[in-house]
Image (cartoon, grey):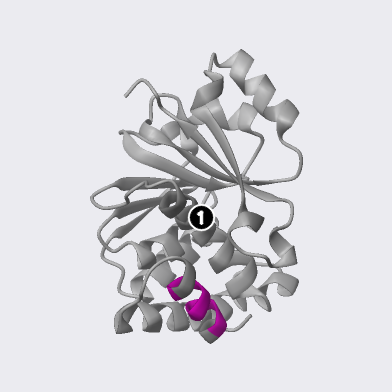
Amino acid sequence: MDCKEFIDIIENKLQPLDGMQKEQFRLAGELYREWNSRINVISRKDIDELYLHHFLHSLSIAGYMKTFGISAEGMHFLDLGTGGGFPGIPLAILFPQARFTLCDSIGKKIKVAEAVASGLGLKNVETVNARAEDIDGKFDYIVSRAVTSLDKFMPWVKGKYRKGILYLKGGDVVEELSLIMGKYRLRSDSIHTWRISSWTDDPYFSEKLVIFIENICN
């Protein structure tokens, strides 16, 4: 998938993009390839499918939000375990009216995320080199792309979100979700799973999910 095909999908499935957003998505591809040649944050196999495996996958979170009427306007997102900036940077391009804090404990990865965000002129992005447990403050949403099992992830984010967690995950999650419901006393109606294949028919997404853990107390 090239940038043009990616942009066509986003405009068809999500929202129209202005000229600046289109240029940012195009330039992001160049910046990631340039930085990845110096600091390997994306596998060589995946860098050839950057727009499919990383950009479109990241924006499946926006697909979930649109499908279920969740607005990003004025929201503050924490991208935990962002690596080189996914899903945070594609979401920040799509949602300039929202704020994004990108966090990773590995310095070289956050260096790439910071450089790409700066190169794109993203004023709504800040980067933090820290462990999840050391992040202060409270965010509207936490987003993440399968950095660990949900059983390990939940203690990291306890008390850090107002509205919910949007988590990208693959495979069979039934046992994992059952475990966290019991262990962390989550109500069954607070956990929602959404097959990305219902939004895009590319075979890459056949087993991939967006999991939304809603903070139903607020």
- In this rendered view, identify the residue nearer to me: 86 or 65: 65
Numbered-mark total: 1
Residue appearing at x 72%, y 30% in the figure: 174
- The secondary structure that dominates the magenta segment is helix
Amino acid, disc 1 = Gly
Can residue 36 be seen here? The reply is yes
Residue appearing at x 26%, y 65% in the figure: 123
Q: Position of residue 145 (x, y in %)?
A: 58, 49
Mark 1 surroundings: few (<14), some (14-19) or many (≥20) residues within 10 A? some
Residue 180 lies within the magenta run: no
Residue appearing at x 28%, y 60% in the figure: 124
Q: Secondary structure at mark 1?
A: helix
Residue appearing at x 69%, y 70% in the figure: 46
The relative height of residue 205 versus residue 6 in the rendered view (above or below) is above
Q: Position of residue 119 (x, y in %)?
A: 37, 77
The relative height of residue 108 versus residue 179 in the rendered view (above or below) is below
The relative height of residue 65 versus residue 213 in the rendered view (above or below) is below
- In this rendered view, identify the residue nearer to me: 141 or 17: 17
Q: Position of residue 24 (x, y in %)?
A: 39, 78
For mark 1, what is the residue?
107
Q: Quadrant of the N terminus?
A: bottom right
Quarter of the view holding residue 66:
bottom left
Q: In the shown orientation, is residue 62 left or right of residue 218?
A: right
Q: Which residues, given as a range, are shown in magenta?
A: 5-11
The relative height of residue 58 versus residue 122 in the rendered view (above or below) is above
Q: In the shown orientation, is residue 173 left or right of residue 92?
A: right
- In this rendered view, identify the residue nearer to me: 191 or 57: 191
Can residue 86 be seen here? The reply is no
Q: Quadrant of the C terminus?
A: top left
